Image (cartoon, grey):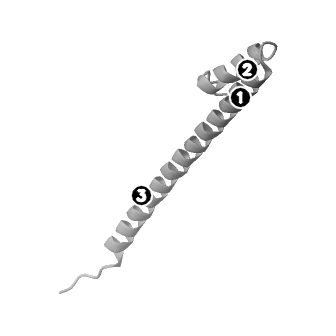
Amino acid sequence: MNVKLGMPEVLVLFSLMMYSQNYWFSVIAFTAGLLARFCSYILEVGKAQKLSEQKMQEVENVTDFVKDIFSHEKKV
């Protein structure tokens, strides 16, 4: 399990502590924390998807190379 304690988590904890003092400030901090974590998650998913596409492309390049080696006939 990958546990992170970054700025989004700090904002959510801060909103919890500020709830009794100032409701709207707490709501804004909570919303900012959720939006920040959502954006971070989307970026991580995009990065993982791009990495898998690059690996798939490399595998296709290797298979094409091997096919080309064995498909060419020797000319005499």
**Which image quarter: residue 15?**
top right
Name the residue: 59% across, 45% down: 45
Disc ID at residue 15: 2
Q: How many marks?
A: 3
Q: Position of residue 9 (x, y in %)?
A: 66, 23
Q: Position of residue 62 (x, y in %)?
A: 39, 62
Query: Crowding near pointer 3: few (<14 within 10 Å), some, many (20+)?
Result: few
Residue indicated by mark 1:
28
- Which quarter of the figure is the N terminus placed in? top right
Nearest the eye: 29 or 24: 24
Q: Position of residue 64 (x, y in %)?
A: 39, 69
Q: Say which amino acid is labelled 3.
A: Glu
Name the residue: 62% across, 21% down: 5
Name the residue: 52% across, 45% down: 47
Q: In whole angstroms, how far apart are the C-alphas of marks 2 and 1? A: 8 Å
- In the image, taking residue 35 as reference, residue 70 lies left or right, namely left
What SS does tag 3 mark? helix
Q: Which circle, 2 or 1, is nearer the viewer?
A: 1
Q: Say which amino acid is labelled 2.
A: Ser
